[in-house]
Image (cartoon, grey):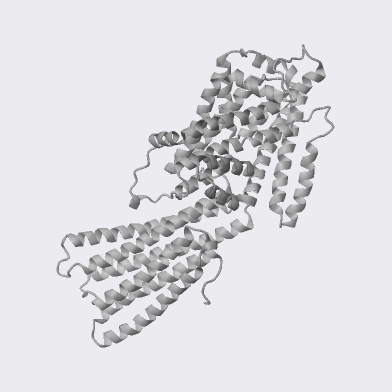
Amino acid sequence: MSIWIILKLLGSLALLMFGMKAMSEALQKMAGPQLRHVLGAMTTNRFTGMLTGTLVTASVQSSTATTVMTVSFVNAGLLTLAQAISVIMGANIGTTLTAWIMAVGTSGSETSPFDISIVSYVGFFIGIVLIYMKKHRYIGDFLFGIGLLLLGLTTLKATGMSMDLANNEAVTSFFKSFDPDSFWTTLVFLVLGGVMTFCVQSSAAVMAITMLLCSTGAMPIYQGIALVLGENIGTTITSNLAALSANTQARRAALAHMFFNVFGVLWILFVFRYFIDMVCGWVGYDVDMTKSNASSAAFLANAAKLNFVLAAFHTTFNVVNTAILIWFIPQIERFVCWVIKPKKVDEEEDFRLHFITAGFMKTPELSVFEAQKEITAFSERMQLMFNMVGELLDLSSSISPKKKKDSKAGDFDKLYARIEKYEDISDNMELEIAKYLDSVSDAHLSDETKAKIRAMLREISELESIGDACYNMARTINRKFNGKQDHFTEEQYEHIHQMMSLTDQSLSEMNRLMGGRKESYDMNRTVNIENEINNYRAQLKSQNINDINNHQYTYAVGTIYMDLINECEKLGDYVVNVVEARMGTRLRGV
């Protein structure tokens, strides 16, 4: 075999894989946000979940993208694991559309009046025009992707024809060395398909190779379909290995995906030949026709149907498997939860990100979506830290300055140490999320996504500042507690609690925005709370001077008192900055 033919074969596979990737990413850029809303809304039961998974996967041409979105919703509490399993089942059906695209792309014959590669050249021309127009460049990216995919398929087929695999003695003798009626032959090719998919990391490439070998007459249809079954398992091995570093729900979803495909392969092995013969009958392919018992034209016409047999089998197998397992989703959920137990990690010592998982994300648009979930968790954690500062203040007021060695004093020290850990957590979260967003920004992104990343970088910076403000308040309380200062007056405590209550309201509004959709958020609430905080701070500042002059308390106590008030006001400013970054608009005239 010539080295040039081998290079042409590898190059056409590379074109196919890159075209599929470019097409999928372009579709996600065009429809990603809308599809996420559909995915969250149309999963009221197992059947709508399955249908949603099918439609979303068929739309973006990526079962991985659908699985990642689904796991994100599970982590966010928008979907249960059972609903996620139904979506993943639907994704397995939706991904079979790829096989139909390939079947159409390689369906032409030497006697066919239409060459489908013409479509690829038309796609290149229209695509480059749209890309340079910028306004519709995502459609252009999609057309370029489909063009590369079809060009890769037609080049692959032409290369296979030129290799004349059906008359290649080495190739035919290899396949003839396996007994076509042996169960072990089916198992060998099943394992081979899984290994090939795992090695090339592309089920589309393995499907293309299978179609090439079958359509040229080199490999019998039964062995080809065994490769397709192996490919179904191989693609789940990849996702399970990628999910090893992910959180518990991601690993459970990946295991459910593997269970679904492995179970399907097990039952299909019992009816292997009967099932394939049934599909061949639907397509109109004669499994008994050979070159010796039919005319050349009839044999070629029959062989041309092989790719459609593979596509039809792939779809029928996944539809039937889903029809069987969709009734056992609760049992599958219990099984994966039993196999994968949640990690027992002390929340205070857990500096890992929960939603961003190394190696699990493959699409920049979806990576941004995951990062947004992480920022939401960051925001909620900062409000929890602020509430701990309030507890620290109450604890300090309940301990007499002369009894700082009682049990409550120990509780004070533990709570202060916990706030210190939260400060470390906020620093780590800011750095890790920023690092992740920086790596995502290196990819080819839509303008909308680029703007989101800029806004998210500002959000995490301001959230970290909220953590700093909380820690400054805790240090102020600790300094007063360990010093020889008197307690605040009842009036001062009342004022501090009122200011902290306003600040907590501001944080609650911020978290309502971070966890929801900005279209339904009323910005006036945040602005009104901010104005109330500013006015109250100005009032307390003036009153503090008068109280010190009237000897209501010492100057030192008044200074600590105003430090806490001022930190609350600063924290309110940081909250407004976060809201402005998320909303993409300024809320204040300054």
Q: Is residue 239 left or right of residue 447?
A: left
Residue 124, given in percent of the width and then of the height, sits at 76, 45
Residue 15, given in percent of the width and then of the height, sits at 70, 38
Q: On screen, 355 above or below 4? A: below
Image quadrant in which you'd find residue 311: top right
Q: Is residue 124 left or right of residue 72?
A: right
Residue sitting at 79 percent across and 28 percent down? 109
Image quadrant in which you'd find residue 282: top right
The answer, for residue 258, to whether it is visible in the render is no
Residue 321, given in percent of the width and then of the height, sits at 55, 30
Total marks in image: 0
The answer, for residue 496, to whether it is visible in the render is yes
Residue sitting at 49 percent across and 39 percent down? 85
Q: On screen, 216 above or below 512? A: above
Image quadrant in which you'd find residue 508: bottom left
Q: Tell which of 320 and 336 is nearer to you.
A: 320
Residue sitting at 63 percent across and 50 percent down? 31
Residue 512, given in percent of the width and then of the height, sits at 45, 61
* On-image quarter of the N terminus: top right
